[in-house]
Amino acid sequence: MNDFSASEQKKFVTPKSIIWFIIALTCMGGYYFLINVGLMKVQGLDFFYLWSSGR
């Protein structure tokens, strides 16, 4: 058991894990963005009203 755990000492941060983290981050960001747009459409608000109301 001890030699098995010694052979499994791998780096936690690898390029593959970084790529998957970025993929998951963009998926979650898009998910919350779509929820935000959907909620504002339910409430009858334009999503970009903050930008358009500043003029």
Image (cartoon, rainbow, N blue to C red):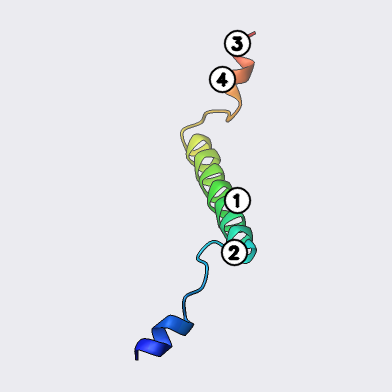
- Quick check: marks 2 and 4 in contact, CB under 8 Å? no
Q: Is the residue marked by circle 1 packed among few (<14), some (14-19), or many (20+) residues within 10 Å?
A: few
Name above or below for residue 8 compared with residue 29.
below
Tell me the kind of residue under disc 3: Gly
Find residue 43 and report its horizontal and vertical position in percent. Answer: 46, 33
Foreground: 35 or 1?
A: 1
Tell me the kind of residue under disc 4: Leu
Tell me the kind of residue under disc 2: Thr
The residue that disc 1 covers is 26
Q: Earlier in the sequence, mark 4 or mark 1?
A: 1
The residue that disc 4 covers is 50
Residue placed farthest to the bottom in the image? 1
Find residue 3 and report its horizontal and vertical position in percent. Answer: 40, 89
Q: Which mark is residue 14?
A: 2
- Cα distance in 3D space between marks 4 and 1: 23 Å
Foreground: 29 or 45?
A: 29
Name the residue rendered at 50%, 35% in the picture. 40
Q: Assign a secondary structure to mark 3.
A: loop
Name above or below for residue 34 compared with residue 7.
above
- Cα distance in 3D space between marks 2 and 4: 40 Å
For the image, the number of numbered tags is 4
The residue that disc 3 covers is 54
Mark 2 vs mark 4: in front: 2
Residue placed farthest to the left in the image? 1
Q: Quadrant of residue 54?
A: top right
Name the residue rendered at 54%, 50% in the picture. 31
Q: Earlier in the sequence, mark 2 or mark 1?
A: 2
Q: Earlier in the sequence, mark 3 or mark 2?
A: 2
